[in-house]
C-alpha cells in the first residue's frame, strides 16, 4: 500500500538520535519539515527544546547544516544566512527556522516582524507547545486560558493562566506576509503540504504548528498525536492559510467534539471548573463566528 | 536511511572545536536505554500504510518490503506507532533487560 504523503517527502532522516522526551510533538514537527525541505535546508534553532535536544556535543542530530541562534534572533539570523548564501552564489537552499512559542510570540517577535517587513526569502516555523517547556513549563504568550504552568499555578482563587492565547497567526498575517499557515502535528499530511507550499513561494513564510508536549501538558507519551488531532476536532485550534490577502480554512470539522473532554484529559487543565470551561467554549464559538465571517471556508 | 553511530571516542580539550562548528549528523550514543515498553511489528498484520513512519517523532520506523521496521537503537518506546496503527499490527510489550 503506497502512501502519497510518505512518497512526497524524503526517505532520509535529517533529525535523528535526538534527546527529546519520548512522544515529543516538537521533534515530530521538525523531523517532518526537514524531510520536506531536504538536505539543502539550513536550519536555525534559537534557545529552546529543539536546540537543547539536537546539539549535545558530540551527539549532533541534525544531518543538514544547522546553527543555534540567540533566543530573540531566529528571524534575523535567517535573514543573514539567506543573504550570505545568496551572495556566495548558492541557489538551491532553504533557510528555515524552528522556534518555540516563547521564541516566536514573546522573545523573537521583533526579529520576525522585521524579517517579514523586509520580505526575506525564509521559512519560519513556530512549533507551539504552549509554554516554555525547555526550562520547566513557564507561561508564554501562547499559553491558553486556564492552563496550569509553574508561573501560573492553579489555586482556589486563580485557576491557572488568566489571559487567552495570543493570536500569532493573524499578527503575522497582518504584516501582509506572502504566506502564513496554521497546522497541527495531529494532521501531519496537512502540515507537510503547507511546508511544501511554503518552500515554493518567494518571500517570508510563516507556519504555526501545534506540537503537544506530554511532559508539560500532562498527557501520556503515546497520546501526543491523538491530542494534537483533538485540539483541532474540538475547535480550539483551526487549520488555515493566509495568502494573497485572504484567509482560507483548510480543514473544517463537521461537528466539534467536546472541548471539556479535550481539556479534562490533560493534567494542566484538570483543575478547571465548569465556569472556566464555559469561558473557553464561548471564546471558541466566538472565534468560529469570526472565522465564518472573515475566512473563505 | 539514517546517520550511523560512530565509534566511541573520548574528546579531550584539544578535540573540542574552537569555532563551535562540528560535523552534522554525528551520533555517538543510542537512546534505547530510555525505553520501558517495546513496540513490536506483527508482519502478518502490517499492510504498509506508513502511518507509523509518518508520525514517529524519532523517525525510527522505516518501510522495508512494504512492512514497518523499527530501529531499536533509537526507539524511545513512546507508543505513538501502536496507537496510530489501524490494523493493530504494532503491539507493545514490556522491555526486558
Image (tube, coloured by chain):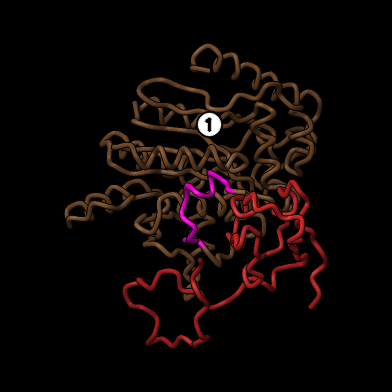
Of residues A56 and A92, the one nearer the viewer is A92
Q: Which residue is mark 1?
A: A166
**Residue A146 shown in magenta:** no
Instruction: State left or right for residue B17 relative to residue A223.
Output: left
Measured as percent of width and height from the top left, residue A103 is found at: 47, 46
The number of callouts visible is 1
The stretch of residues the image draws in magenta is A2-15
Is A227 situated above or below B53?
Answer: above
Q: Residue at x 55, y 42 (%)?
A: A128
Q: Which is nearer the eye, A268 or A67?
A: A67
Please report, as a chain letter, where disc 1 is located: A
Front-lying residue, A249 or A101: A249
Q: Classify B19 as above or below A209.
A: below
Chain B drawn in what color? red
**Quarter assignment of residue A279:** top right
In the figure, the brown chain has which letter?
A
Q: In the shown orientation, is residue A164 left or right of residue B39?
A: left
Q: Mark 1 packing: few (<14 Cα in 10 Å), some, or many (20+)?
A: some
Amino acid at each position: 500500500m503506497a502512501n502519497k504523503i510518505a512518497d512526497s517527502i524524503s526517505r532520509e532522516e535529517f533529525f535523528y538520535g535526538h534527546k527529546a522526551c519520548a512522544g515529543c510533538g516538537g521533534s515530530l514537527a521538525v523531523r517532518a519539515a526537514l524531510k520536506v525541505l531536504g538536505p539543502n535546508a539550513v536550519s536555525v534553532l534559537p534557545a529552546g527544546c529543539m536546540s537543547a535536544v539536537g546539539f549535545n556535543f558530540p551527539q549532533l542530530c541534525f544531518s543538514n547544516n544547522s546553527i543555534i541562534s540567540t533566543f530573540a534572533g531566529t528571524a534575523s539570523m535567517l535573514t543573514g544566512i539567506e543573504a550570505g548564501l545568496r551572495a556566495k552564489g548558492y541557489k538551491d537552499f532553504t533557510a528555515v527556522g524552528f522556534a518555540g512559542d516563547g521564541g516566536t510570540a514573546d522573545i523573537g517577535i521583533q526579529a520576525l516582524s522585521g524579517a517579514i517587513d523586509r520580505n526575506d526569502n525564509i521559512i519560519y516555523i513556530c512549533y507551539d507547545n504552549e509554554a516554555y517547556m525547555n526550562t520547566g513549563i513557564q507561561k508564554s504568550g501562547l499559553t491558553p486560558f486556564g492552563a496550569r504552568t509553574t508561573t501560573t499555578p492553579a489555586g482556589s482563587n486563580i485557576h491557572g493562566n488568566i489571559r487567552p492565547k495570543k493570536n500569532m497567526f493573524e499578527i503575522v498575517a497582518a504584516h501582509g506576509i506572502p504566506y502564513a499557515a496554521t497546522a497541527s502535528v495531529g494532521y501531519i499530511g496537512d502540515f507537510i503540504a503547507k511546508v511544501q507550499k511554503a518552500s515554493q513561494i518567494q518571500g517570508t513564510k510563516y507556519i504555526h504548528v501545534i506540537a503537544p508536549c506530554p511532559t508539560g501538558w500532562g498527557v501520556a507519551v503515546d497520546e501526543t498525536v491523538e491530542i494534537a488531532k483533538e485540539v483541532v476536532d474540538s475547535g480550539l485550534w483551526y487549520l488555515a492559510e493566509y495568502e494573497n490577502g485572504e484567509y482560507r480554512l483548510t480543514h473544517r470539522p463537521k461537528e466539534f467534539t467536546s472541548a471539556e473532554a479535550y481539556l479534562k484529559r490533560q493534567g494542566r487543565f484538570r483543575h478547571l471548573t465548569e465556569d472556566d470551561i464555559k469561558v473557553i467554549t464561548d471564546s471558541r464559538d466566538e472565534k468560529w463566528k469570526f472565522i465564518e465571517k472573515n475566512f473563505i471556508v | 536511511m539514517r546517520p550511523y553511530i560512530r565509534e566511541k571516542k573520548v574528546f579531550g580539550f584539544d578535540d573540542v572545536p574552537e569555532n563551535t562548528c562540528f560535523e552534522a549528523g554525528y551520533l555517538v550514543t543510542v537512546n534505547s536505554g530510555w525505553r520501558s515498553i517495546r513496540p513490536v511489528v506483527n508482519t502478518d498484520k502490517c499492510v504498509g500504510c506508513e502511518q507509523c513512519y509518518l508520525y514517529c517523532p524519532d523517525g525510527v520506523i522505516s518501510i522495508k518490503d512494504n512492512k514497518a521496521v523499527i530501529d531499536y537503537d533509537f526507539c524511545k518506546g513512546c507508543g505513538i506507532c501502536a496507537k496510530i496503527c489501524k490494523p493493530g499490527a504494532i503491539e507493545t510489550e514490556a522491555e526486558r533487560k
